[in-house]
Image (cartoon, rainbow, N blue to C red):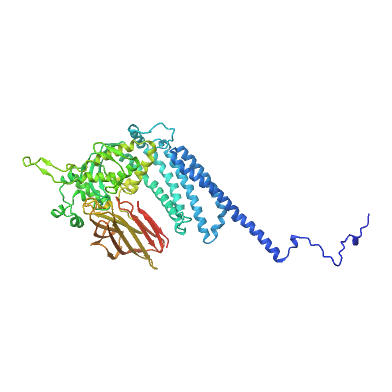
Amino acid sequence: MPQINFEESLVQIKPDEKPIKRFRFWKFHRPGKRILIGLSLAFVVLFVLILFPALRVYRSGMVLAESARRAKDSVNSQDITVVRGELNNFKGDLESFQGAYRWFGWVQYIPWAGRYWKDGNAGIKAGLHGLAAADKVIETLSPYADIIGFAGPESDTAQSGEDTANDRIEFLVQSVEQITPQIDGISAEAQAAVAELSKIDPNRYPKEFRGIPVREKLKNGINLAIVGAGFVSKSKPLMEAAPYMLGMDEERTYLVLFQNDKELRPTGGFITAYSIMTVKNGKVSQVNSSDIYHLDNAYRPVVPAPDPIINYIKGVYAALDKFRLRDMNWSPDFRESMDLFMNEAEKAGIEDIDGVIAVDTHVVVNLLKAIGQIGVPGFGNFSAENDERCNCPQVVYELESFADVEGPVVWSENEPEKIVFAPPNYDNRKKIVGPLMNSLLGNALGQPKEKLPDLFEAAWDSINEKHVLIYMFDENAQKGVESFEIAGRIKDIEGDYLHINDANLGGRKSNMYVTQEVSQDVDIARDGTVTKTLSITYKNPQDYDGWLNSVLPNWTRIYVPRGSELVSVDGFDDEGETYEELGKTVFSGGFELRPQGIKQIIIVYKLPFKVSDDYWVYLQKQPGTDMPLYVVNVGGKTEELFLKTDQHLKFSI
């Protein structure tokens, strides 16, 4: 065995030479070693907790955005199979996004930032529930896809024409009982989506980001979901009553009242005309209209009229201070008004009626926007296009000009019952209404299927915005229309409540031009006491014409929670009383608004309860009105909206 000389094997280092230093990580001492380890760990944490999840969320988000666009565009195909396929794709992409989003789950435990992660998580869950509801809706509607215009371009049935229109209605009516049981499942998913969305507070998000209105879009999305879920849950009682209302067992007879919203009255407008309509198996009979004054001429007034009607309208009320039928929609609660009206109308010959349907001019305009110009035999063409003669829809101008041709009535000297001269349409100023409604109905039902979504939207807007009200004598049917909120009832609401009700008592059509803006400043004291300052601003920007636009004598009633205490009121020319009605406290008063004029009413009052948690206010819209602007300020938080339908607002305090 060879001998090893350890001395020779050692590296010999000369005195003037420095030893060669070799890097060893485990030899890295003190601060440098700690910094390097810290940076390495930080990079790993950053990659695992932030960079990698962010990359996954970004990629999934881009896929989801494209999927959402395709799902939205699929609706335009009017093919229910395509829509369902794209919604399924969107659901899969949303689930993938949810998986990526969960990698950021640790953020929920961080103060401040955690709220935003939870909002996103709630939004994802709401989306999945919403897609589940949409899938159930599509499954329910699939058998009727062709009828509602969503059978796709290959369908060769129900394309257009009067022959297929009746077939569509008859099939839908016969299918009501099959559709009704599906509503519970759809409603459950929709309500679950709303429950998730209610966890999101839009007010903590910026008004806009890079020009995009973030907060407004978020609020609108949440409100749309709430409205949709409410629509589904409220529709079941109406669907259950639908066979009765549509005359599936026997013919139903309805009194149709035409309310002129340009001459605003409490339930939507002055009752200007009426007709009798029958419905059998969903098919509507031809409508013949008559002037409300003809019905009034057959009625002997016996019911005492309220002071505002007597003092403002005067005329016939100066001779006899009893209600005329045309003014009996005085209560803002449509059922209350119709209880009175129908009880008295029976004395004038209106008998064997199953219900009352009230419509205003917005219904006509909405349908014409969807259909386009139509012809009415013997009366000409009508459209929703703006008419420069009145700066209003052409159909509105024609209706008003037909009814309001003025002039003397000359009777024969030799034959006292013979009229020698009278202005056009003297015998029946409203006879145009019936033929117009018949033409509208016929055109609507005969539209090609690609027009049906627009027609459904026009019908929905008319109902949702309170331009159609229904009153039924049958108890179950009345419960159905009340549940669906098309009965025009003043609602019993916990918390704050506001309903502003105006009545034009001048006989002119000035409401065509009048706008309304409502501002509420809510002051909540430390002990929870609530003091409100309500400002109502009325404006008439148009010139005086002595016909459609002249001085507006208006009577205003403001319905607030029962027991509210009036502090001060300013702006009324004729300050009315404070009293209780329909379970509310009412502040009232009258004023005149001139063309190109402005009138502001300011009322300060205290609520009858204290607020310790969230502040809720229910805003109930007056039927017949368009979209008044409402602004609510609570402790620095502001909600601004156009009141198209009733709204329930919540403020965290």
Image quadrant in which you'd find residue 542:
bottom left
**Residue at the farthest left position:** 414
Q: For this view, does 498 lie left or right of residue 102? A: left
User: Disc count in the image?
Assistant: 0
Residue at x-position 85% and y-position 67%: 16
In the rendered view of the protein, which quadrant contains the C terminus? bottom left
Residue in front for this viewpoint, 375 or 240: 375
**Residue at the farthest front position:** 388
Q: For this view, does 535 lie left or right of residue 114? A: left
* Residue 468 in view of the camera: no
Residue in front for this viewpoint, 102 or 454: 454
Residue 307 coordinates in the image, percent (x, y): 19, 57
Residue 76 coordinates in the image, percent (x, y): 43, 40
Residue at x-position 45% and y-position 45%: 133
Residue at x-position 86% and y-position 61%: 11
**Residue at the farthest bottom position:** 526
Image quadrant in which you'd find residue 282:
top left
Residue 553 coordinates in the image, percent (x, y): 22, 56
Residue in front for this viewpoint, 272 or 166: 272
In the rendered view of the protein, which quadrant contains the N terminus? bottom right
Q: For this view, does 72 lie left or right of residue 262? A: right
Residue 212 coordinates in the image, percent (x, y): 46, 54
* Residue 292 in view of the camera: yes
- Compared to residue 42, the image places residue 90 above or below, namely above
Q: For this view, does 57 lie left or right of residue 165? A: right
